[in-house]
Image (cartoon, rainbow, N blue to C red):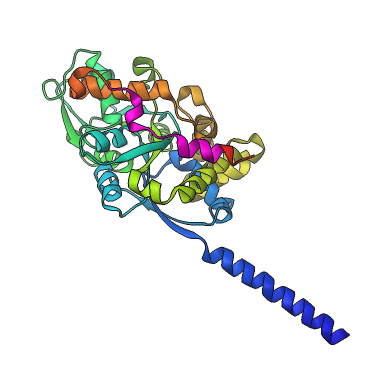
């Protein structure tokens, strides 16, 4: 009898082990590319709380040096999912003729125009060089718009230096101000440089451009068609991650997570977190929802700054496929 009981216990243990092993075996590998920073809070939280594992996904995160590698790497299949300012997706779809779709929102950017100590106004940038990621995408257009309202035109009244992502723009400002008298930055970089006294802020572009859809997620259409269930599960993990992160009950744990993962001082992590909670100021949207009015601003800026589409932006629908996001939401409690 005792031997039979031991056999049953052993059989149950082996069955449990086999089930666990099978679950791990089912974890789908997924390679994503992004810029480091606060905008990745949902991903950091999902990793921290085991939400990707819960949805049977093995995620590998790659930090991109610039938007060119992000777009070209996605198009070439080196990565399956891109997280960044969605204007990059517009450029990829419209200029590079890549069959891609934006599938989820994220945040409004929380951008500030950071300048060298000698710069006291936008007018002081006349005749200077400003640093951007790439000359014709995303936050560069926000900078151009701020200068345009002061009567300054790119190439005529100021020059542009393509430095790369936020970290690279910050390095350019530190290394050679002649190439970088100003640059757009968001948390935690903006908070760090302002508090250090190295540089200062000339304010946010929000008062000029209005609502703005910054961070988001996009994919190749062909990949999404072949991997719909995986994409939906990935979006669900992100949504659950941001829900956990913005819950006030988890603040202390989230701030520690930011400090650890982004290598921040506790006060910088705390300030970054507080900024991220302010959706009206460009923080995280509830459930990472897509801001359609903000996206219309993205398209309008591209039309105005680049003269694209003859200066008249197209309907947003050609760049979007929110069906995966809707399925992800519907599958969550």
Query: Which residue shows up at 78% across the image and 77% down it?
Result: 9
Dominant secondary-structure state across the stretch colored magenta: helix
> Does residue 222 lie above or below 88 as drawn?
below
Magenta stretch: residue 136 in it?
A: no
Numbered disc total = 0
* Residue 308 placement (x, y as % from top left): 19, 24
Q: Nearer the viewer, residue 44 or 303?
A: 303
Query: Which residue shows up at 24% across the image and 19% down it?
Result: 147
* Residue 99 placement (x, y as % from top left): 28, 41
As drawn, is 269 to the left or to the right of 223?
A: right
Residue 135 visible somewhere in the drawing: yes
* Residue 130 placement (x, y as % from top left): 21, 30
* Residue 326 placement (x, y as % from top left): 51, 35
Give, as a single range, the part of the protein colored magenta: 314-329
Name of the residue lying farthest toward the front: 225
Q: Give the quadrant of residue 290.
A: top left
> Does residue 190 lie above or below 257 as drawn?
above
Residue 125 visible somewhere in the drawing: no
Name of the residue lying farthest toward the right: 1
Q: Give the quadrant of residue 315.
A: top left
In the rendered view of the protein, which quadrant contains the C terminus?
top right
Q: Nearer the viewer, residue 180 or 207?
A: 207
> Does residue 218 lie above or below 229 as drawn?
above
Q: Nearer the viewer, residue 321 or 125?
A: 321
In the rendered view of the protein, which quadrant contains the N terminus?
bottom right
């Amino acid at each position: 009898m005792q031997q039979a009981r031991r056999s049953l216990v052993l059989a149950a243990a082996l069955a449990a082990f086999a089930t666990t092993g099978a679950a791990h075996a089912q974890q789908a590998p997924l390679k994503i590319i992004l810029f480091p920073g606060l905008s990745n809070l949902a991903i950091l939280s999902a990793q921290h709380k085991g939400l990707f594992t819960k949805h049977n996904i093995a995620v590998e995160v790659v930090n991109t040096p610039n938007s060119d590698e992000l777009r070209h790497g996605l198009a070439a299949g080196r990565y399956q999912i891109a997280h960044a300012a969605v204007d990059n997706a517009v450029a990829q779809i419209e200029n590079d003729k890549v069959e891609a779709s934006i599938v989820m929102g994220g945040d409004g950017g929380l951008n500030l125009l950071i300048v060298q100590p000698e710069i006291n106004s936008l007018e002081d940038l006349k005749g200077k060089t400003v640093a951007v990621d790439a000359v014709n995408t995303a936050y560069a257009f926000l900078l151009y718009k701020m200068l345009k309202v002061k009567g300054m035109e790119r190439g005529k009244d100021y020059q542009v230096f393509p430095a790369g992502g936020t970290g690279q723009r910050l390095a350019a400002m530190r290394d050679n101000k002649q190439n970088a008298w100003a640059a757009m930055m968001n948390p935690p970089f903006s908070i760090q440089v302002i508090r250090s006294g190295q540089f200062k802020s000339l304010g946010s572009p929000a008062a000029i451009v209005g609502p703005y859809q910054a961070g988001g997620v996009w994919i190749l259409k062909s990949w999404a068609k072949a991997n719909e269930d995986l994409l939906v599960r990935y979006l669900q993990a992100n949504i659950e991650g941001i829900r956990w992160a913005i819950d006030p009950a988890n603040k202390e744990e989230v701030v520690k997570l930011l400090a650890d993962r982004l290598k921040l001082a506790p006060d910088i992590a705390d300030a970054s977190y507080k900024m991220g909670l302010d959706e009206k100021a460009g923080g995280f949207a509830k459930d990472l929802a897509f801001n359609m009015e903000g996206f219309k601003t993205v398209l309008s800026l591209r039309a105005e700054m680049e003269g694209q589409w003859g200066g008249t932006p197209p309907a947003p629908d050609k760049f979007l496929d929110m069906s995966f996001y809707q399925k992800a939401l519907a599958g969550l409690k």
